[in-house]
Image: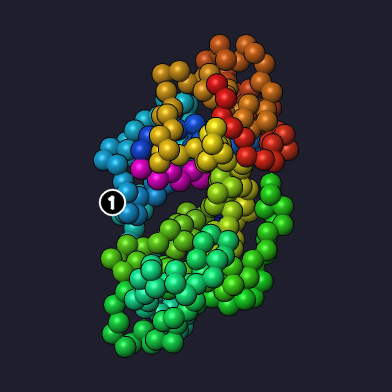
Amino acid sequence: MPISLPAGPIYRGRFAPSPTGPLHFGSLVAAVGSYLEARSNHGEWLVRIENLDPLREVPGASRVILKTLDALGMEWDGEVIYQNQRYNAYQTPLAILERQNLVYRCTCSRKEIADSAHRGIDGAVYPGTCRGRSSSEGYSGAWRLKTDNTLIEFNDAFQGPVRQHLENDSGDFVLRRADGIYAYQLAVVVDDAEQGVSHVVRGEDLLNSTPRQIYLQRLLHYPTPSYFHLPVVVNAQGEKLSKQNYAAPVNASDAVPQLTSAIRFLGQDPPAELRESDITSFWKWATKNWKPWMIPRTKVMKTS
């Protein structure tokens, strides 16, 4: 059944961290960018914890992330949504796609895929080995969504035009893993639709996933939000700043200087005295003076 955006503000944004560790500067930049876009447009800002995979979740990380956001003065609207509590919500759209013969079971190993795949935008493209299987044949394994080479295109509010032919560029992608865990692509589409998210502001590292999400939205008759992909923060080696390469956690006890560094990274030009202000004064200035067209268009290394 089609989902319509609920009555309320025209703009509804969100920040959706994965609790694989505390917030670091890279995730702070994404949070600040999405927050300022929402608040400067007089909109709502939601927080969703994307904790689908229990093996990747660090115990207590969700609490630490929320505590950090609170200490930084980033007030969210409504209740925080946890994806690991929403498995039933993801089952329904998967069943809809199954009834339409748009998904199938895949038993291929990673090695089998790598040995027969060509390279796409995000690595090996699944060659469709199991595509001919009927879902009624009793196979176990992952659920994959059938794609085609219809052009998927959208205009990112920051990156500009994006175009992909999914079958060639990314292949049939997983909606639920063989171990029963729902995949990010399905969960994020369902959650954005059910929460009425109208604008998605997130890191450029997720830009290539967006056509897959738009494809799913169309199949499920969901609205497509506006997308805005920010430049990512990189380290001295040119790698995306992340928990995997030991990015330092945000020090919430030193909030305003770190927030000031984040908006400087995003191309804003705060006055020097803002670093010495309180959190309320910081957000008042940042919201009033937010200029998204000043954001640099390249990956930028974090500086002190």
Query: In the rendered structure, which segment of residues is drawn in magenta?
Result: 11-20
Q: Position of residue 93 (x, y in %)?
A: 42, 70
Q: Position of residue 10 (x, y in %)?
A: 62, 49
User: How many dots with numbers?
Assistant: 1
Q: Position of residue 151 (x, y in %)?
A: 66, 71
Residue 130 seen in render: yes
Q: Residue furthest left?
A: 59
Residue at 64 percent of width and 66 percent of height: 164
Q: Tell which of 180 and 42 is nearer to you.
A: 180
Residue 145 seen in render: no
Please name the predominant secondary structure of the magenta segment in the image.
loop
Q: Is residue 242 above or below residue 257?
A: below
Q: Is residue 41 above or below residue 147?
A: above
Quadrant of the rendered image containing residue 144: bottom left
Q: Residue furthest front?
A: 115
Q: Amino acid at mark 1?
A: Leu
184 within the magenta span: no
Q: Tell which of 62 and 301 is nearer to you.
A: 301
Viewed as shown, does residue 127 lie left or right of 300?
A: left
Q: Which residue is mark 1?
A: 55
Quadrant of the rendered image containing residue 212: bottom right
